[in-house]
Image: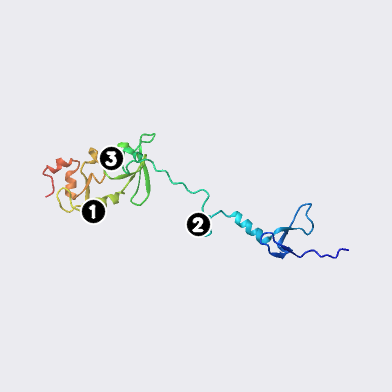
Amino acid sequence: MDDTEPLATKQCASCKETKPLSQFLRRTGKRAGAGARRGACRACRLTKEASDSLPAVPANDYKATRRKAHPIKPIPVPPMSSISLPNDPAVLKPTRQGTIWMRGKTDKGRRWYQEIEPELAITLVKEHAAVIVNRYTIRRLFSNKEFRRFILERDNHICYFCGEFGDTIDHMLPRAKGGHTTPDNCVCACNACNQSKADQDLQTFMNSDELAP
């Protein structure tokens, strides 16, 4: 009868320390005995697995271990020759219907869209009443109330024609003759000059005797 007892400890092949058998994994396979254990202890195996899963970076480089595998590529910048001016009417291009989209806001803040002729869109941009959104769209800068307040405050409530106090807006080139409601074509006017001028051209009215005293 064999009175020898199985070993209760084992030397780790990695750290060379003698540890209880419970610290070693059992061997598997047909040739492995009932008490066969693996060479490295559990602690050394966990340490090796952890080191193998980490990238080879310095220990103090914490950000490097969190870096994404696919960094974001910078957006390519087109050559300067192909970049249009921010508000150049030459970049406008009519839609298939031959029009330009114009958008804006009402006095109450409600958004609106409408289609206009390309010639009108170019005029509104040139005369600082609208800005270009894209090749097919412009945006009106002022609502009706905002435009009136802008013109009156710009001209300090002084009539362009007689120099008196003014609280109305007049078109230097009348709308009946092709003028538009733009900052370049509108001025502050008193009520008397506004009514007297009516649809006359600016030069004709300035040379007449109809100016308010």
Q: In which quarter of the image is the N terminus?
A: bottom right
Q: Name the residue under label 2.
A: 63
Q: Where is residue 94 in the image (x, y as percent from the top left)?
A: 36, 36
Q: Residue furthest right?
A: 1
Tell me, yes or no, if residue 203 can be seen here: yes
**Residues packed near mark 1 inside 10 Å, few (<14), some (14 to 19) or many (20 plus):** few
Q: Which of marks 1 and 2 is nearer the N terminus?
A: 2
Q: How far apart are marks 1 and 2 (CA)?
A: 56 Å
Q: How far apart are marks 1 and 3 (CA)?
A: 23 Å
Residue 202 percent coordinates (x, y): 17, 42
* Res. 153 mark: 1
Image point (29%, 42%), residue name: 125
Disc number placed over residue 123 in the picture, else none: 3
Amino acid under disc 1:
Glu
Looking at the rendered structure, the kind of residue marked 2 is Lys
Secondary structure state at the residue bearing disc 3 = helix
